[in-house]
Amino acid sequence: MQTSSGNSAVGIAGRFDPFRTPRRAFVLAVLAVAGLVAGTLALNGLGELGWRTATRLSARLAFPFFLTAFVASPLARLWPTDWSRGLRRRRRSIGVAYATLQTGHALVILQLARLDDTTLGLGVETVIGGLGIALAIAMGLSSNDAAVRALGGRRWIALHRTGMVVIFLIYLSSYGGRFAADPAAWWPGFGALVAALGLRGAAALQSRSLRSRMLPTE
């Protein structure tokens, strides 16, 4: 039996759900990255140190949003509860929030490049990072029904699946290298990526098993 306070809590959570719609998620992400940058600059100044710190922190702010979108569907498949299904329904909004945060991160990088012209070199890390941001923005801009109709279902799915995989591999390479250099500092992020990969693998195996059971036998 649920108490009145429990009902009230559920009602408040639903009423203030920031990911109920992509528009709400976009506004939340704009406010979050703007607040992060403003606070960082207030503490570290408007010079190179302030913008470099904002670059690092804005990247870290976006990371959990990507991970959440990455595991939303596998979680709902492996543990089909009201919570996991709700998370999967909000995956598009979470993805929009991630793309918005990555756009903010890109703007911070551009500002840092004005202060330090070595920021945007032609190194492999810069090119790969730029690819990840571009894919995130493309996925965010196409996270609506109009884009699905314009691209067609197959092309839309191909864009989002490819983008998700490429961005995950970029994170895995980045966090993996940092973890190898300093395990104590970077194990949470690297461990979260490994766990997310395990969830998706387990969900894929479950789906394959279910399909094999449904095949007709002679």
Image (spheres, rainbow, N blue to C red):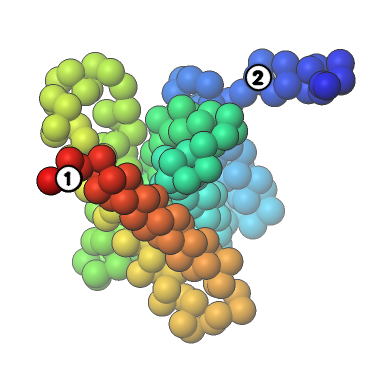
What residue occupies the far bottom of the structure in this picture?
A: 181
Q: Is residue 57 left or right of residue 198?
A: right
Of residues 7 and 46, the one drawn nearer to the viewer in this rendering: 7
Q: Is residue 60 left or right of residue 173?
A: right
For mark 2, does the 10 Å Cα neighbourhood hold few (<14), some (14 to 19), or many (20 or more) residues?
few
SS state under label 2: helix
- Label count reads 2
What residue do we see at 62% from left, 51% from top? 40
**Residue 128 seen in the figure:** yes
Residue 195: x and y in percent read: 49, 62
The quarter in which the N terminus is drawn is: top right
What residue do we see at 57% from left, 34% from top? 81
What residue occupies the far front of the structure in this picture?
A: 218
Q: Quadrant of residue 150?
A: top left
Residue 216: x and y in percent read: 17, 41
Q: Which mark is residue 167?
A: none
What residue do we see at 62% from left, 23% from top? 17
What residue do we see at 43% from left, 45% from top? 74
Which residue was labeled with disc 2?
Answer: 14
Of residues 79 and 186, the one drawn nearer to the viewer in this rendering: 79
Which residue was labeled with disc 1?
Answer: 217
Determine contact: label 1, label 2, CB under 8 Å: no
| Mark before the other along the chain sequence, 1 or 2 | 2
Tell me which amino acid carries mark 2. Gly
